[in-house]
Every structure is written in structure tokens, then in C-alpha cells.
Image (tube, helix red, strand yellow):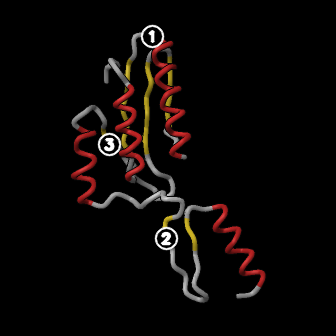
Amino acid sequence: MSLLKTIFWMRFIHTTSFVATNSSKVFFAAVKNKGMALNEEQRKELLQPLLNNGWSMVEGRDAIKKELKFKDFNEAFGFMTRVALKAETMDHHPEWFNVYNKVDITLASHFVNGLSERDVKLAKFIDSVSGEAKS
């Protein structure tokens, strides 16, 4: 492989979630343990409990969302802080919107353009720390 191609692939590896190697053949594999998109079996097994617990599918997009209502802004912000700390350790960040005591959360994995096991893991954590919030 030429020096220019090597530099390109090194930069590609550094700036994306995929790696390409093996001389002239290009193979793509998930890097940094970010996983793959959920398959149909995983969707039935992993998503259904979340859907039964107040999560819903986002229309027109492979993502899940949940709307939570807390007692006041302080509770909502405390909840968001706990989720932010967990999300940072996972390197997986929610899309969210907050007004006073309401928090709307959307989860999707941009690197697979849809849902992955990381979304399920973060959704379960969110459910575990949302306390008495109403969905």
C-alpha cells in the first residue's frame, strides 16, 4: 500500500466508526465496541420490554423515544445529569429536549443509522434512574 493510501486509511480509522484493511480488499467492521444495528430477533427480544415500559418508535426513523414528566425542574435536571454521566462513560449520547419538568429523549446510533444494543442499554439505564417520573 502506498504511503498516501496508508495515511488516508489511518485518518479514516481515526475519524469514523469503521476500519478498512487487508491490501486491495476492503472489509468493514465495527470499532470501539460500538456494535451493529439490531437484527429482527434482537428487536423482538430487546425492544419489546422497552416498548411495554413507555418507549415508542420514532415515526420515519429507526429510533426510540420517551417523554418523561418530573415533579419540578430540579428533579428533571438531576435526572438529565445522571443520564449525561452514564452516556459519557458509554460514549453514546441521547438527543433530548427539556422544558421545566418535562424531558423528551430520543435514542439512535448514528454509526449504524438506526438502533443498536447501546440504545437498549442506555434506555434501560434511563428507566432505572427516572424514578417516579410519569411517561
Q: Which residue is mark 2?
A: 29
The CA distance from mark 2 to mark 1 is: 44 Å
The CA distance from mark 3 to mark 2 is: 27 Å
Q: In this rendering, would 41 be left or right of 25?
A: left
* Disc ID at residue 10: none
* Disc ID at residue 57: 3
Query: Residues at badges 3 and 2 in contact (C-beta under 8 Å)?
Result: no
For the point 58% across and 80% down, the residue is: 21
Q: In this rendering, would 43 be left or right of 6?
A: left
- As helix, strand or loop, the secondary structure at mark 3 comes to strand
Note whether 90 is above or below 13 in the view shown: above
Which residue is at the front of the view, 126 or 55?
A: 126
Mark 2 or mark 1, which is nearer to you? 2
Residue positioned most to the right: 3
Residue 66 location, quadrant:
top left
Amino acid type indicated by mark 3: Met
For the point 49% across and 28% down, the residue is: 82
- As helix, strand or loop, the secondary structure at mark 2 comes to strand
Amino acid type indicated by mark 2: Ala
Amino acid type indicated by mark 1: Asp
Quadrant, the N terminus: bottom right
Callout 3 environment at 10 Å: few (<14), some (14 to 19), or many (20+)? some
For the point 44% across and 24% down, the residue is: 103
Q: Mark 3 or mark 2: which comes first in sequence?
A: 2
Q: Which residue is mark 1?
A: 72
Q: Mark 2 or mark 1: which comes first in sequence?
A: 2
The percent position of residue 43, horizontal first and vertical second, equals: 27, 53
The percent position of residue 85, horizontal first and vertical second, equals: 54, 33
